[in-house]
Image (cartoon, rainbow, N blue to C red):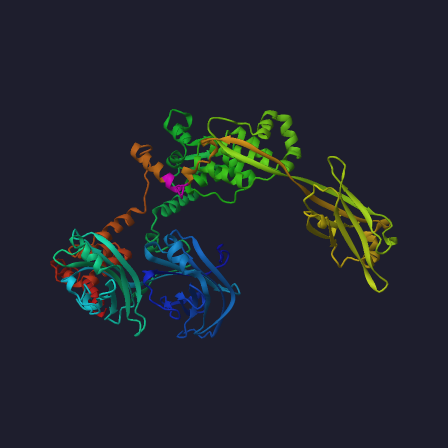
Amino acid sequence: MAAVGCAEEKCFTFTWKLENMSYCWQNNKEPIFSPKFVVDALEGTKWRLSLYPRRAEVGNYIGYFLNRDKDCSSGVNDIEINYVLSFMAADGSVLQEYKAINRIMSKDKGEGFPTFVTRNKVFFKERFRFLPDDTLTARCRMWRSDGKTTEDGKIYARTRIRVESRSVGWNIEKFSQLEPYKAITFPINSTKENKQLMNLDLYLTGGQKFEEVLHFKLTAVDRKIKMSTIQLSLLDNAGGKTECVKGEVWFNSPENLHRQLTFQTTRNRLMAAKDVYLLNDVLSVLCECTFSTGVVLGEIEAVHCNDKDSIPEQSIANLADELFVLKVNLRSSFEEGFMSDVKLKAKTCSFPAHKVILSARSPVFKAMFSSDMRESMCDIVDIRDMDDDTVRRMLQFMYTADVDDLGWSSASDLYAAADKYEVLTLKEKCSCYLKANLRPSNACEALIFSDLHQEEGLKHAVQDFILKHSWEVMNSDEWKQLMETDLKLAAETMSDGKTTQNERIYARTRLGAEKRSAVWNIDEFSEIELYQAISFPIKSSALNEELMNLDLCLTGGQNFEEVLHFKLTARDPEIKMSTIQLSLLDNAGGKTEGVNVEVWFNAPENLDRQLSLMSQVTRNRLMPTKHVYLPNDVLSVLCECTFFTGVVLEEIDAVRYGDKDSIPEKPLSNLADEVSVLKINLRSLIKEGFMSDVKLKVLTLKEKCSSYLKANLTSSNACALFILADLHLDVGLKHVVYDFILKHSWEVMKSDEWKQMMETDPKLAAETMHITFKE
């Protein structure tokens, strides 16, 4: 959905990250809430967001709402606002968005969108976009309807659902002797407190006449468990997984505390393969489960007012793809020109740039700056053959891989620049734009342009377009001019006669179609007798033969309005169908009232079609306005029709086998983001030591190190990392270490490292212990 928002107004933005979204346990009518927040710019009112993960009563949707809190110190009972609710991607782009305007929000009132987005889209079809690392990013933007929001504000919040994973093996002894319908139980305990959380029961059904099927039943013992995912796998004697069954279980009511899982295999089959599964009559089952016990953390991470550029460090870290950060940094370098070491001089303006970026994007610039050419010795590159806008757009793409607001002219100019400096992905972007915006009016220009730049992919696309729209193109003034200036190119296009070793097959079927536009001047209109038809012949422009008749007759009389009726009749049996538009012309020749219709002449009994010309049009109405419609008592009717006579051409246009040059440079554009190409090129320059005096600061290095430390947390290094995260104010790393200590408190707090931290930083240790025991 297209983004909507408050781009031109001051507004408040609340960004909420919901971690472990897949483990939301809420049922149909149950929401999960964000932390509450106060908006000073909206009279100090207090708010929170709510999500309904399963809005089943309106379909399989996620509901999304904005709620005003009842406990608010503000004396304002009602406030009128506009708001936009969004789901965001990791790179900050909008994935789904809805806007509400002029909404009066009272205390303890909430509203929103119960069908905000389908669960299938979020959890399955586009999960990688909506839930990177199983984290949903929701955003709310709010501002006063009267435009009196005085300042911008930003708040970042986070809610984390506690999730614990367990993987345990259950060795079922004397499997061959188990009695049918008699359950045996395996307890699943918490790793933290060794407390029983769930039970897994096994029982066999069947008997002497039926296969004995294996059934497992999962039951919640700890009522704090909200939901669980479980996978059961049979292990062979070598410990390898074979057959498995898995499911999700919601323990959200007393009557819904268990779930049954059934294997397709049976005891009979396992006994027959006991040398694979039943070593010493023991069946081994691997139980892998993950369960949530509710919200473990809900906090406000950062608050920013009147600070559009400030984003909390953790938010940047959670963007997941360092290419986005690289793109942001490069855009900043482009716009600010900080530490630029070269200027590109266009027709009237000079643009600061960085040699290393230009060299990474363009082999032409790289050769220029690394050789003995004049440009490598000075800080100015003269490219006055290009206009300012083209140079600006090319530089913008080199830094950011973005091109904004392309038009036909700018795309053509930009393609020429990209061709000159060998910026291949920019060439492809411009080529794609030109192909997508081909029209009969610009096809000849595009053909000449593609031939000039030897762009075979674009040229073939233009030639195909011209062949498909041959009537419009080859009857245009531009085509006539092309026939005079480049007859060879025109002939090549008409024959499409490039038959080479690398070819594909293109076939073409053309329907015979002819267009006619004629004015019928109906003389002595006021004296036409009722029900007496007058005819107007529509002739072929090629052979001047009569193809169709257009008849006019008036119906009505003394007591009724005299309505104009037209009837279209086919005279040529070859005509299969026709489109026709009839318009009344005023004295200035302008179209006024009209009607258009399609007529099929595909059977003898359907060779005419009667149509009313806007039944409101009557002679009674036209006569009082004869100074507009009836000069000298003449009514003018414009008839525009196109008629089709069936298939007139079936042919093979061309045979091209593996014509690689006619295929756009997809491998480059398929890298998903051209910034990755820049990254590859920069890496190459670093290896080469090219322009090594230029220092580049990579802001994502800190996040890469932080990610490594998080992934390698152990009980022995948790204290050291906790001190490190606190020292460097790395909130994200600190939270991860804190959670690790919380889960492994027994091992960590009994260690020598913890005792040492108690001595060196008692405040940090005491704070952690307090929160741990409170949890």
- Quarter of the figure with residue 153: bottom left
State yes or no: residue 333 in magenta. no
Quick one: 304 or 111, which is closer to the camera?
111
On screen, residue 615 versus residue 392, left or right, reads right
Whole-percent x and y of residue 768? 21, 64
Whole-percent x and y of residue 575? 70, 42
Q: How many marks?
A: 0
Whole-percent x and y of residue 289? 25, 61
On screen, residue 441 versus residue 219, left or right, reads right
Judge whether residue 347 can be spotted in this image.
no
Quick one: 487 or 495, which is closer to the camera?
495
On screen, residue 601 versus residue 676, left or right, reads right
Q: Which segment did they paint magenta?
A: 670-678
Quick one: 609 or 702, which is closer to the camera?
609
Say above or below: 534 vs 616: above
Quick one: 284 or 336, which is closer to the camera?
284
Say above or below: 441 vs 563: above
Q: Residue at x 36, y 28 (%)?
A: 370
Q: Which residue is drawn at 32% across and 37% down?
A: 683
State yes or no: residue 677 in magenta. yes
Q: Which residue lies furthest to the front in this view?
A: 209
Judge whether residue 343 can be spotted in this image.
yes
- Quarter of the figure with residue 725: bottom left
